[in-house]
Image: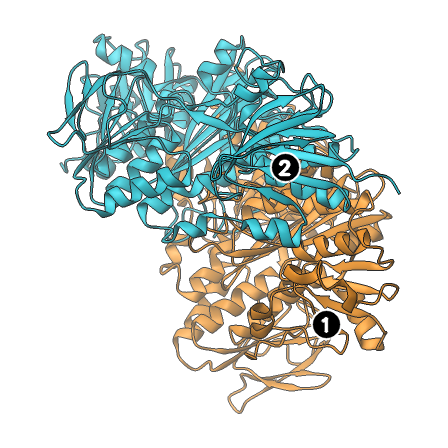
Chain colours: A orange, B cyan
Amino acid sequence: MTERKKIVIIGGLACGPKAAARARRCDPSAKITIIEQEENLSLATCGFPYFISGAISRANDLIQRKNDHFQDVMGIDVLSSTRAISIDRSAHKVTCTDLKSGRQSDIVYDKLVLATGSIPVVPNLPGVNLPGIFVLKNLDHAKAIHDSLISGKVKNAVVIGAGPLGLEVAEALVTRGVKTTVVEALDWVMPTLLDFEIAAQVGKHLRTKGVDLLFGQRVTGFENDAGGRVSKVITRDSAIEAQLVLLAIGVKPNVTLAKEAGLKTGATGGIEVDAHLRTSDADIFAGGDCVENTNLITGHKVLTPLGSTANKHGRVIGSNVTGGEETFPGVLCTGIAKVFNFNVGRVGLNESQAKAAGFDVVTSLIPGNEYASYYPNGKEILVKVVADKRSGRLLGGQVAGPGDAAKRIDVLATALTFGASVDDLANIDLAYAPPYNSALDPLHNAANVIRNKQSGLAKALSPMEVKELIDKGEDFVFLDVRESAEWKARRIDALQVKLLPASVLRTQLGSLPKNKKIITFCRTSIRAYKAQRTLEGEGFTDVSFVEGSITAWPYDVDESPK
Amino acid sequence: MTERKKIVIIGGLACGPKAAARARRCDPSAKITIIEQEENLSLATCGFPYFISGAISRANDLIQRKNDHFQDVMGIDVLSSTRAISIDRSAHKVTCTDLKSGRQSDIVYDKLVLATGSIPVVPNLPGVNLPGIFVLKNLDHAKAIHDSLISGKVKNAVVIGAGPLGLEVAEALVTRGVKTTVVEALDWVMPTLLDFEIAAQVGKHLRTKGVDLLFGQRVTGFENDAGGRVSKVITRDSAIEAQLVLLAIGVKPNVTLAKEAGLKTGATGGIEVDAHLRTSDADIFAGGDCVENTNLITGHKVLTPLGSTANKHGRVIGSNVTGGEETFPGVLCTGIAKVFNFNVGRVGLNESQAKAAGFDVVTSLIPGNEYASYYPNGKEILVKVVADKRSGRLLGGQVAGPGDAAKRIDVLATALTFGASVDDLANIDLAYAPPYNSALDPLHNAANVIRNKQSGLAKALSPMEVKELIDKGEDFVFLDVRESAEWKARRIDALQVKLLPASVLRTQLGSLPKNKKIITFCRTSIRAYKAQRTLEGEGFTDVSFVEGSITAWPYDVDESPK
């Protein structure tokens, strides 16, 4: 009989337990040990904001599998409340400290798995260690924030960082009745994930929910009250009252053990791994937040600290430490977040990332309905698709709004996985029935708009391009082709705006200048595009439409009734 | 100046208007005419069941674009209430009758588009023309059914045919308080779309909603009451009371005009078209329900009478009649239907279709949550994925349940479009956050189960295979590894069942026979699969698990508390 293979896994959150479970299924006789510094394995860290908001009522619901389950059902040894402090690669052993007893011990491995995760970035600022300032990474943090809110003493809060975690917690705070400000150093929400046009709609929504947004300002320090707790967050322009502060400016891979053991890390700061998730030591694998991944669009290395990736890593590693040959292809940096009543998702490259990666980019921006417009209670989404101008290859997409964004993001993720073009996307046989979709999905329409741009049929400007013309006071006609009832309800306020409804456009062409720049808009740009083509057919020489029209207009819209 | 191109389109429902609109955008000067026998163009026929149920309150909401819009905004001539009665291909003209005046006229075309749609199949049965027996194809039908229900005289109804339309209308009838029976000649709901295991869950759901289902019976005729209206539907075994009957046994392509004009039709009965949607006459294009499509999985010709396909056809045709070179690749026979609180979708080939097409098939059947199990109010779905055993290529999928099926079907549709394998599917970077998904999507799990079967790790039986063993009285252990609280709440009743919870399985192996057949089950099969691997590791020789376990068990389950 062969000896039992010794598999040791450092980290018990997502990748680690998954690797352990997979290894157990592949090799029923292996000796498998998980070392975890916290008390509980398998925590649903992504659920913390919903525990803070009260949507999830018990902290215990965030423990996905009890430690007993690993021991009893899977025969996996669990060393919880235990910290791995060093790795001796030549002796194939890990030295650990039992955090309760302080006792130190060595554990020998044949294969070692590093699933050490990530740690929140804490900026080096005056007062950053004051009581009342939190990060949100483990269950103790979540409980502390929760208890602090329950105490009723928190009236004002500041979230630093407008990424998904920051916005999820902002929603939780508002749900708890706390006046909340989000401070973001860059210029819009989710700035590294979303382009401005999409982020602007998310920002508008946050403001309607009472969240204050402060963009383009870095926090410079914190002040405390007489009791020594945080009382104010200081930025260049303001001092914001806050009895609770969340630092949500990002995480970095936890690679201390790996580095001390001499394993290679990449330029991203994550552990370098090959497609088998093997580190620079053939007996050590690594996965989850602590490693870098390959971006499937650019081929570049990126950090993608997400539970979805960590779980896929875990399976691959569990197979490979037991003799398998499984590979992990890479990531699309897919992400989604619930922001109050908005669903906000993105995948692949956004426009600025695509440009930075050297692509010549074509995009489309279209408002759509989540399902058939005549079916009751359907909600809107705003879709942006990014593609390579020459080849038509899809590069990425963003979807936001009260409607179903997740489905569209997942379709785009799947299409991007296979190198789809906009032509491909336009004809995918997606499921249609009125409660689920329109006959053509908004993604079909988004693909068709790009095809129309490529063929020269559609001449479109971005809202930002039009806004620049307006702000410069350029002499052009900003032609609103909606019907007058629509105009009365909401309008874009600009000197250049002229109303000429689509229903009378063909008969009142004489009222328009033939050789002046005309930019059309309507509610969603369908009529605006038709108007562009109509005017061109009648000999007008400089006609275009603004993408997304009034629905996607990222600036103020006048909604006072006329 | 060149002469205006004359484009004539016969059919104004979906493909026709879309072709017209696209042609207008491509060629602002073309003379475009739509001929439609009904009064209104652009009807939302897929919305009829929701008008009948009352979810959509006004019939006018089903008119997606008014005829005026085509005329005024798009400059398209609309001949409504007009029937095209013949095509003279050599003279390039269509003869029409104005259905109101009876006047006949000829319209000359450069390019002709046939978008003549489909017609409901009406079986040749005694009494089939009785008042109270309906098909549902045009707005008059919808209004007649609606008015008949509003009258309050309909207490009992029969729907003939358990396809999507039949089930959608059954729901509408129940919503209106009508006792409803669905009669289906084949053996389960949506029999040409779904495999038994999935259909069985839909059937169970329909029964909980009060719908009577009668399978394997053909209707042989109808009886009438003293007033001459339908009163009973007669089958081999029964006479079912009904004051209203819907014939929903399918549609056939409307190809009369095409055939009379000598255009080629295929073995399916639909008009033959090439990838450009050109018929056997280079100046005549055809699209929508009246043509046959290429199934992208098998390469075979199929009929897919759906608004989604018709709209895509319309765009391709609109481009091509104005000089473009656009192609339509084909279909995946994607379909979805709301059946009360169930979302039921399918794409590609189901298991029996795949076998019929000559594939050696491997499948997986897994219950899943629509999103993270700890996030509140998540609902279940049941997923079946079908793949080619040797290559692992995906062939199709089915999803049903109260949870989000549409997203998974659309992901599968996209993956199938690009010839994805189960390995590909397992690693697609789908969007993850607790309100939208688990870290691994049910599709990831479904792909992994197939990979586990392929590698020999997972040994699974279908529920049907296990049921056959039970019914034959075979001597095996049907091992329920759930905890006893779960067993008390619901059980599979069979002599072979033995309860041995996963939490004590490893310590009580002695109570199990080493060389007897053991089939494990739990709630969803995760623990059952673990138990299979555990027992194998301990030297048990014949262990497998039943896919989907008690959650997907398509037969009766004992839910009386113990």
The dot on residue A514 is: none
Location of residue B365 in the rendering, given as x and y in whole percent from the top left corner: 42, 26
Indicate the quadrant where residue B144 lies.
top left
Dot 1 falls on which chain?
Answer: A
Q: Chain of mark 2?
A: A
Disc 1 secondary structure class: strand
Rendered-image quadrant of the C terminus of chain A: bottom right
> Where does label 2 land, which residue?
A414
Q: Is residue A87 above or below residue B196?
A: below
Q: Identify the residue at horizontal 30%, vertical 17% (top origin).
A: B185
Task: Identify the mark at residue A498; answer none if there is no mark.
Answer: 1
Distance (Cα) linking label 1 and label 2: 42 Å
User: Picture quarter containing residue B216?
Assistant: top left
Q: Position of residue B241 (x, y in %)?
A: 15, 29
Query: Badge 2 local density, few (<14 within 10 Å), some, or many (20+)?
Result: many
Q: Who's the residue at 79% across and 42% down the image?
A: A298
The type of residue carrying mark 2 is: Thr
Tell me which amino acid carries mark 1: Lys
Apparent side of residue A270 relative to residue B250 in the rendered image (left or right): right
Residue A415 percent across, percent down from the top left: 66, 37
Nearer the observer, A438 or A544 = A544
